[in-house]
Image (tube, helix red, strand yellow):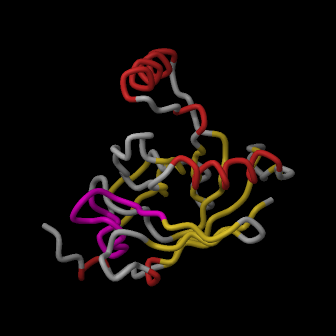
Amino acid sequence: MIQCEMDYNTVSTDGKTVKLLCYGVGTFDVFSGEKSTTNISECAFKDKAALPPGNYWIVDRPTGSFANRVLSAIKDWRNGTDHSTWFGLYDSQTMSDHVFVNGVDRGGFRIHPLRPDGSGESWGCITFSTVPQFEVLRRALLTTQKVKLKSGIMAYGQVVVSGRTDYENCRIK
């Protein structure tokens, strides 16, 4: 199982990236959240904001219903992405990819790269700017021994996300 840490206190001077440290694998520049809320943990309760601080299990990406799988395939074909390579992030308390943050339901957390052309978004995911960097972590995760959690879910590893949780100091409206 691979242990990772992402600390919003390691945000770059331009605010665009934070460090994701995965022991035995490497340190990666990643980002989380869209535009005005990127890498701002005290705004993690906002829609499409940064991944909330907490402990997350790295699991196979949930695929959803048949309709969702068809929709993903269409998006992949149109955008040049491959959702099947992504990983899910399950909160260690809820054992799902949903969590309440400051009274707001957030979810759909993933680890994924931007599209090959560099476009794309991060709606509370751990997002790599390049596919090759993502592939380094992906290969390591796929070759590690998974662990069975109490819920029966198999996990590749864990990410501890740290940062400020003083949500009243979020300056984004």
Residue 169 is drawn in which quadrant? Answer: bottom left
Left or right: where does residue 31 sit relative to residue 110? left
The residue positioned 47% from the left and 63% from the top of the image is: 30
Name above or below for residue 86 compared with residue 95: above
Q: For residue 38: magenta?
A: yes
Left or right: where does residue 131 sit relative to residue 13? right
The residue positioned 78% from the left and 69% from the top of the image is: 24
In-front residue for pair 67/84: 84
The residue positioned 52% from the left and 31% from the top of the image is: 82
Q: For residue 77: magenta?
A: no
In-front residue for pair 38/13: 13
Residue 124 is drawn in which quadrant? Answer: bottom left
Left or right: where does residue 42 sit relative to residue 68? left
* Residue situated furthest left in the rendering: 173
Residue 119 is drawn in which quadrant? Answer: top left
Region of the chain picked out in magenta, as a range = 30-46
Quarter holding the C terminus is bottom left
